Amino acid sequence: MHHTARTLSIVLLALVGHASASAAVAQVAVAANFAEPIKAIAAVLEKTTGHTLRVTLGATGKLYAQIKNGAPFDALLAADSKTPEILAGEGHGVPGSRFTYATGKLVLWSAQAGRVDTQGAVLKSPGLGKVAYAAPKVAPYGAAAVEAMQKLGLTAALAPKLVQGESIGQTFSFAFTGNADVGFVALSQVLEGGRLKSGSMWVVPQHLYSPIRQDAVLLQRGAQNEAARALIQLLKSPNTQDLIRSYGYSI
Amino acid sequence: MRPGQAGLAAFWPAHSVLPNTMLLTASDLQAIGLTLKVATLTTVILALIGVPLAWWLARTRSWLKAPLTVLVALPIVLPPSVLGFYLLVAMGPNGPVGQWTQALGIGLLPFSFSGLVVASVFYSLPFMVQPVHNAMEAMGTRPMEVAASLRASPFDTFFSVVLPLCRPGLVTGAIMSFAHTVGEFGVVLMVGGNIPGVTRVVSVQIYDHVEAMEYGDAHRLAAVMLGFSFVCLLALHLYNNRHRRATP
């Protein structure tokens, strides 16, 4: 027993020592639409530098509220450009660290193949069931969906069918389980290797909503964090940008 | 956050003589109305399902007693995310409940008022069944034997003897089911879809206020919830005390 405890503590000490010597850990707040790419990017970061990311996913507005209230994040990958700008203005962001890591696209998606046509006419069909979108107050993709519905002149017609997800992640799950007939989600959620994973989609034309410019910012807490700084570097590298594009973003 | 609504300053404005409820927005009042509707309906349905179930559990010698007692208690220990996830999948178009409701022409339950009530019934089931079950077991078999010797039918015995004797358990079950349904949050968040007037209950409304940093609005509504829960539990406490003194 005594022996085991001592061995264990030596192993633990070795691990801790190893971590502090060569690799750092960063807590990163990431907009839910970037859930898939950040997994791949974290794996690349770990392989090339040994640094580890601890990712917290959520709606951008919620992550902002958490950061403002002292949440221990080293960097934020937002789904808009406004939030990082406000954080920088309030002194939470490291000056000059803001940049656009991706520009997102909004899609109308259904888990059912053939449900969504390439013109989005399904939104006007009488048999349309529930329409999922993300909470516009906190989720930029939700705000984009509201804008698109307005420009299409369908706000009133769709109002009784709308259901709201807490983030674009929950919105996707509503559509994925079929409980919502269609959902306004991020292109990155339904693409894999540049192709539609399943179901059917309509890529909402860009003129129907303001560009979703997704900015990243290094936060004050992460100013000296090696892992967070390495992540920012990695996001700017051409290879990573190609990877991000493969999920349907433009840069 | 809207200007002038921050924190405690907005809580009791010095210049205002309006009652506190006047400070709630129309959508807050709508959420309160909806919450009371869900909780009332859930409590009524639980009384209809839970009391017979408790009676059966108290009387049976079937091997099913143990697994069923455990099943009823599960919502107390399971996280709402587990319950919410299973309900979302089961009530979805490919789930067993969803296929059944679609065949009946009801459509799908998630994001609907009925779906919310169904979820609440599962979630609050132990809060009705357990107190009633305990009261029925504590009563023992003696009152029923006496009633039978007086030639009362089992049906008559249940309504004229069992239910009156178990009244404290029934009252506790009803108040706890109601209060617990009002306090429901996680399950609603997962199967509700946050629709004003349909599934946006008070707890979700508060969460939305907090997430959007409308702390003044969150404060007011949270205070209403705190007051309500306190009054509920106080009423239950006073009732139980009086009852204990009345029947030593």
Image (cartoon, coloured by chain):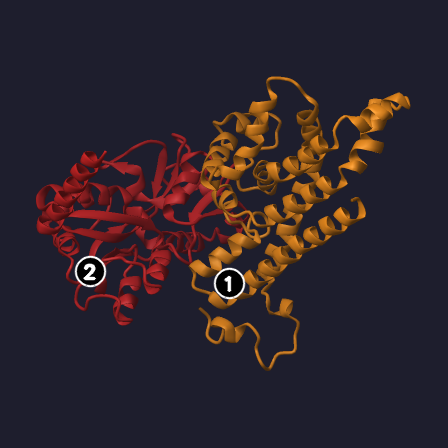
Q: Colour of chain A?
A: red
Name the one closer to the observer, A74 or A149: A74
Mark 1 falls on what kind of element? helix
Are both tags, 2 and 1, on one chain?
no
- Residue at the disc numbered 1: B218
The chain identifier of the residue carrying mark 1 reads B
Is any atom of residue B134 visible in this view? yes
Q: Amino acid at mark 2?
A: Gly
Name the one closer to the observer, A201 or A42: A42
| Residue B99 image point, x, y percent | 54, 26
| Residue A69 image point, x, y percent | 35, 64
Q: Amino acid at mark 1?
A: Ala
- Residue at the disc numbered 2: A222
Tell me the quarter of the image containing the N terminus of chain B: bottom left
Toward the bottom, the furthest residue is: B15
The answer to whether B108 is drawn above or below residue A213 in the figure is above
The answer to whether A231 is drawn above or below residue B19 in the figure is above
Quarter of the rendering containing residue A48 = top left
Quarter of the rendering containing residue B103 = top right
Left or right: B248 in relation to B230: right
CB within 8 Å, label 2 to label 1: no
